[in-house]
Image (cartoon, helix red, strand yellow):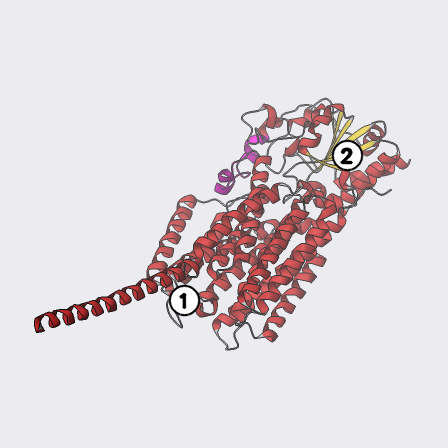
Amino acid sequence: MPITVSLLAYLVSSVCCIMALRGLSGPETARGGLLFGIIGMALAVLTTLMLPGVQSYGLIALGIAIGGLIGAVIAKKIEMTALPQLVAAFHSLVGLAAVLIAAAAFKNPEAYGISEGNGGEIHLGSLIEMSLGVAIGAVTFTGSLIAFGKLQGIVTGKPVVFRGQHFLNALLGLGLVALIVLLCLSGSPLFFWSIIGVSLLLGILMIIPIGGADMPVIVSMLNSYSGWAAAGIGFTLQNNLLIIVGALVGASGAILSYIMCKGMNRSFFNVILGGFGGETATAAAGAQGDRHVKVGSAEDAAFILKNASSVIIVPGYGMAVAQAQHALREMADHLKSEGVKVRYAIHPVAGRMPGHMNVLLAEASVPYEDVLELEEINRDFSQTDVAFVIGANDITNPAAKKDPSSPIYGMPVFDVESAGTVLFIKRSLGSGYAGIDNELFFYDNTMMLLGDAKKMCEGIIKAFEH
Amino acid sequence: MTDNQKLIEQAAAVASSAEGLSSQASDLALQISTAMAADASGGTPFFVMGLTVFVLACFVGYYVVWRVTPALHSPLMAITNAISSVIIVGALIAAGPVEISPSKWMGFAAIILASVNIFGGFIVTRRMLQMFSKKKK
């Protein structure tokens, strides 16, 4: 295949990848988008296989078969609650693959046409691009592994902080820059491997101080990094397809991180510096005192819900932990058959990754028209009879609006307290994920339903049937 | 007379050498111009071209991703994950040569990793998208 044709094929492939993201603007067009993505990827692989230097088809087919099989089995078996871990694990693979490819290009630059003649030195520009690609790839690899460990519960979800942490990270960052400069000056393999080593260490140290509550931002950020790594490799291989797709993925991850940060009213740097959610737990616990809390049973809740004309359900990650989404949807179906208007309100940071709650509700066959975002529904609470909070806490905390001393002050929250009645399912009266006390529990129109979210929903359904 | 003839001969010799010089100069000019033309078409560093593409693609990504509905942010992450594995292109080139070398094995390992991602990413995206259904009538 002449080089022009393969370049044009790569261009078509890039357009397919753009169309894939474009399709996600709505659930109806999303499946078409997915098809575009698959076509784009297949075209990219086939075009590369036809390049003159690519000949060992047996080995390549074996690699794709092994990887494809592993990927397919994992993707088919994974629980939707474990989606964030899966995505983090996948990001680490992209990072490692980027490191391997850059290393392969470093050892055998002639194959990529980036050196002076046969066995000559690698171009200076290629060295810079290569070292950037390999550094971002290595940070993505270990960073994602730590994020995976935290989400899976292998590594502690609490922020790991120690003295001089930021200083050490800054030192490593500067060391990395120095190593890249040294590599460009000398081209010595020693510096190349050192860059990989330092970047791997930096990836671990960057993610370890970040608490579990901030994982949605981190997973999106690593998504972005995997894109930048791909773009870096694209510069090294002088391939526009990789640059375009890398830039798309990088932009996507960056936007998602921004949305997540805004949902928590935190700056990106505040999240990156870490340590949030560890020290506040003890400070807030004293304020609880002996204020009055109204506690109700499943029967009470069923009575209130039945007599309502409109209900907004506010789900949080606790719902997914209790696997209550199916029972919840059944409960909502009962209410709908009684003519009650039921809607769901999703906070941007509900769940452990962007859009996680929407997927969990969709899995429980909640129609997506009933699921609304924060800005779409927040005004409707004042005209709603019942706000039903299940497995959420901090995203309903009025302190975010009233108490400037609260760590979550300024974070956008649902105005659940303006609904007629707030039904709040919770395991105990403890504080939320961010370790902050919720004064909503003590409001007059709040009724606490203490217990497991799934059992409570089932109890309410049972009470409906009697 | 002989002096005159000599002068004419000398003038002719100067003229011919001047002619040779001018033709050499034009040759040189031609060489320079072809060299410059080569530099302009194939010789520009890829970096500038690549950077142009990169910056424009960032803008495309920015506008496309803001249009993605928040409900589909999880599928967005899964699909971007899958398509970022387009770096398999680099892995294929590394694993491509017939001769056995460390590069080839690194390429092979990268092919496996990227394939896990491509298949896993697309399949999990499909699973998610299939769940998003409209109201039953």
Residue A380 in the image: x percent, y percent? 73, 27
The Cα–Cα distance between marks 2 and 1, rounded to whole angstroms, is 61 Å
Q: Main SS of the magenta segment?
A: helix
Q: Residue furthest bottom?
A: B99
Q: Give the residue type that dot 1 points to.
A: Ser
> Is circle 2 on the same chain as circle 1?
yes
- Per the image, the residue denoted by label 2 is A343
Helix, strand or loop at label 2? It is strand
Label for residue A38? none
Q: Quadrant of the N terminus of chain A?
A: bottom right
Residue A392 in the image: x percent, y percent? 68, 36
Mark 1 belongs to chain: A
- Per the image, the residue denoted by label 1 is A115
Residue at image x 71%, y 48%?
A30
Residue at image x 63%, y 58%?
A40
Helix, strand or loop at label 1? It is loop
Q: Quadrant of the C terminus of chain A?
A: top right
Closer to us: A75 or A442: A75
Based on the picture, tell me whether residue A277 belongs to the magenta stretch.
yes
Q: Nearer the viewer, mark 2 or mark 1?
A: 1
Image quarter for residue A9?
bottom right
Q: Residue furthest top?
A: A444
Magenta stretch, residue numbers:
A267-285
Q: Which of the two labelled residues, at mark 2 and mark 1, occupies the earlier sequence position?
A: 1
Q: Residue furthest front?
A: B1
Mark 2 belongs to chain: A
Residue A294 in the image: x percent, y percent? 74, 26
Residue at image x 66%, y 39%?
A350
Based on the picture, tell me whether residue B109 belongs to the magenta stretch.
no
